[in-house]
Amino acid sequence: MIRRTLACGIAALGLAATPALAADKVKVGFVSTLSGPGAALGIDIRDGFNLAIKHAGGKLGGLPVELTVLDDRQTADAGKQEVERLLQQNHADIITGIVFSNVLLPVLPAILESKTFYISPNTGPMDYAGAKCNPYFFVSSWQNDEIPGAMGAFMNQRGFKNVYLVGANYPGGRESLGGFKKYYKGKIANELYTPMGQLDYSAELAQIKAAKPDSVFFFLPGGMGINFIKQYVNFGLSKDIQLFTTGFSADEDTIKPVGEALLGAINSSQWGWDMDNAANKRFVEDFKKEYGRVPTLYASQGYDTGMLIDGAIRDVKGRIENKAALRKALEAARFNSVRGSFKFGVNHYPVQDYYLRVVRKDEQGRITNRTLNKIFENKVDPYASQCKMPAG
């Protein structure tokens, strides 16, 4: 009886109905490739993410940030180990950072089963774009098919009819070439997949030369693409066979080591450093001041990921323990993207524009990318119609 009376007294005072207080901090786990041949990509994503936190006043959505940065060393085993630490020891509220799909796909089930939000700042695998879409999985970059697909569509417009395809042999590489083929209507001279981390392409280049295609499209991110381009030019193929790629192999991280050999390279991307909007201008200028280099598309994706999180936490007034509300806030994507137009589709993958870019010298003689024209507008990825998003 005494217990019942006490409970009633508390309810009468309104204490039982007091809403949960906002969290005192947000725990973010950042796992990425920070060593080895793909390290430049992870470092750029990390630096862009950190700049977003700085622009948000050193917080995310008004909450202090406990940021744990870990290196997956581009292997699934290391990724699993670090993700387990974030889930079991750090009790992360949000995880992000992974560059490569061969790392993400093996670790993602554990993250999603724990009902922890994962926001991908790079790879957008088709596995979770369709029937396996998940309320706790968001992609702030692109679906793997779309940037290569934009280049396939452009090559159709320009009348290329016999292309040779080269890709890295991992899920992201296979999906990228698959995306290209969805839109390209000409002949495929051959389709080669090379081991992850391969740096000598002499055998592949000999095969390309013998096949005599009118064009080559390749997807080899990081150091793989740098070596491929250098060897392609040294082999003399660039004189007769037009080289096409995605922004992943024709951005500032590739331009610096490759140099003039990359001039004229035509590539596709969802972003360019010269895009004319206020958020992008601020990002580019401050990134250059902070890190002493021009940002890449990877850095822009890390930045947008941070600003997406900042906006969502702000919208829920710091109450990140309310996962249903946080999910809705993430879906609303109320932030100013460096890309300009940005929103999520039903599958939590971006609906956005894709552009044609070319590597050229600017007015100061610097080798850099220039954004040309739009290839796709408000593009929805091809798997979104298969997504029946479950409740959180």
Image (spheres, rainbow, N blue to C red):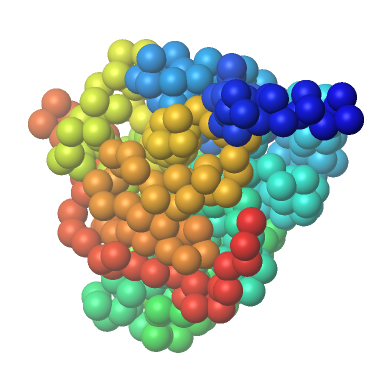
In this rendered view, identify the residue nearer to me: 109 or 142: 109
Measured as percent of width and height from the top left, residue 63 is found at 50, 20
Residue 309 seen in the current view: yes
Residue 236 seen in the current view: no
In which quadrant of the rendered image does the C terminus lie?
bottom right
In this rendered view, identify the residue nearer to me: 78 or 241: 78
In this rendered view, identify the residue nearer to me: 27 or 376: 27
In which quadrant of the rendered image does the N terminus lie?
top right
Query: Considering only vertical position in the picture, is 362 above or below 108?
Result: above
Measured as percent of width and height from the top left, residue 48 is found at 44, 28
Left or right: residue 97 compared with residue 53 = right
Measured as percent of width and height from the top left, residue 30 is found at 63, 30
Query: Considering only vertical position in the picture, is 100 above or below 273?
Result: below
- Residue drawn where x is 47% and y is 46% of the image: 330
- Residue drawn where x is 36% and y is 83% of the image: 161
Measured as percent of width and height from the top left, residue 300 is found at 39, 37
Find residue 72 and report its image quarter. top right
